[in-house]
Structure formats: C-alpha cells, structure tokens
Amino acid sequence: MARMHSRKKGKSGSSKPQERKKPSWVKYTAKEVEALVIKLAKQEKRASEIGLILRDSYGIPDVKVITKKKITQILEANKLKAEIPEDLLNLIKKHVKITAHREENKQDMTAKRGFQLTESKINRLAKYYKRTNKLPKDWKFDRSKAKLLVG
C-alpha cells in the first residue's frame, strides 16, 4: 500500500502468523484475559498500551485469538471505550506538538508542511469516523480546542 502523502511504496513489516489458534504456552482463559483488559482500562491505559502490556508482562501474544474479540470490542462491551478513537487522538497530539514548535520557530517551513499534512489526516480520519458513527455527526476538529482534547 502506498504512503498517504508521498509517492513512495509502503514500508515492509512483519505479518501475523496464518494459524489462528491459541498457542500452547498461554495459560490464560478468555474470561481471565477479558478481566485483565478491563483492569488495565480502568487504570486509564489505551487499547494499544493494553495490548503491549498483555504481550510483554503476561505473555499473551494476541487477545483476539483467545477471546474471539478485539481489545476495543471488549472495552466497548464494558462501556470503557474512549469517546475519541485512539488513532485520531494521536494525530491531535502530534498537531499540538507541531503547533508549539511552530510558535517558537516561525521560519521552519518543513514543520509548516508537516502541520498541513497532519491536519489533513485529522480531517480525513474524522470524516471516516463520522461516516461509520464512531464520532458524532456534529464533531468538528478545532485548532483552538485541540490542546483541551489532549490535555
């Protein structure tokens, strides 16, 4: 797949194994894994952080293989899902950092270009989330309120 804002091909990376069965070394049941996900979510961890913690600390390579549900689906079922999706929130955080950098370095045109691209990605992703009803239809990205969303 091509990169979004360049004329380059995508980065190669590892892919998950074809087999979709629980590894023999995993000793956790589906209910135990769901309880761990809920416990970590109550500690205000995001879905990606929960996945990393489960992988590194508990030796659970893939939550979906064990529970037949994704981490976000588990959070949604227990009403612990964030109001703004994580990837959109990360882009907003990036936008806030670039804004702060641009205030100090007004002549940095590379940062200006990054700022424009990030804002474009935010708008494109927000449009998708509105269409799929993951964000309210009246949600709008506002530069002035971006710091409050992240803070």
Image: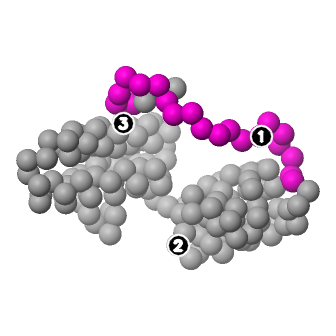
Between residue 77 and residue 84, name the one nearer to us.
Answer: 84
Label 2 crowd (10 A; few <14 / some 14-19 / many >=20): few
| Label 2 sits on residue | 44
* Amino acid type for the residue under numbered disc 3: Arg
Residue 143 badge: none
The reply to whether discs 3 and 2 touch (Cβ–Cβ < 8 Å) is no
Residue indicated by mark 3: 124
Q: Please give left or right for residue 23 compared with residue 115 in the image.
A: right
Read off the magenta span: 4-23
Does residue 98 appear left or right of residue 75 in this picture? Answer: left
Kindly indicate the quadrant of the structure image that contains residue 40. Answer: bottom right
Q: Quadrant of the C terminus?
A: bottom left
Q: CA distance from mark 2 to mark 1?
A: 30 Å
- In three-dimensional space, the C-alpha distance between marks 3 and 2, rounded to whole angstroms, equals 27 Å
- Please tell me how crowded label 1 is: few (under 14), some (14-19), or many (20+) other residues with Cα within 10 Å: few
Furthest toward the right, the residue is 24
Residue on which the image places disc 1: 17
How packed is label 3: few (under 14 Cα within 10 Å), some, or many (20 or more)?
A: few
Q: Is residue 2 above or below residue 112?
A: above
The three-letter code of the residue at mark 1 reads Pro
Q: Position of residue 32 (x, y in %)?
A: 80, 69
Q: Are marks 3 and 1 in contact (CB under 8 Å)?
A: no
Question: Which quarter of the picture shows residue 146?
Answer: bottom left
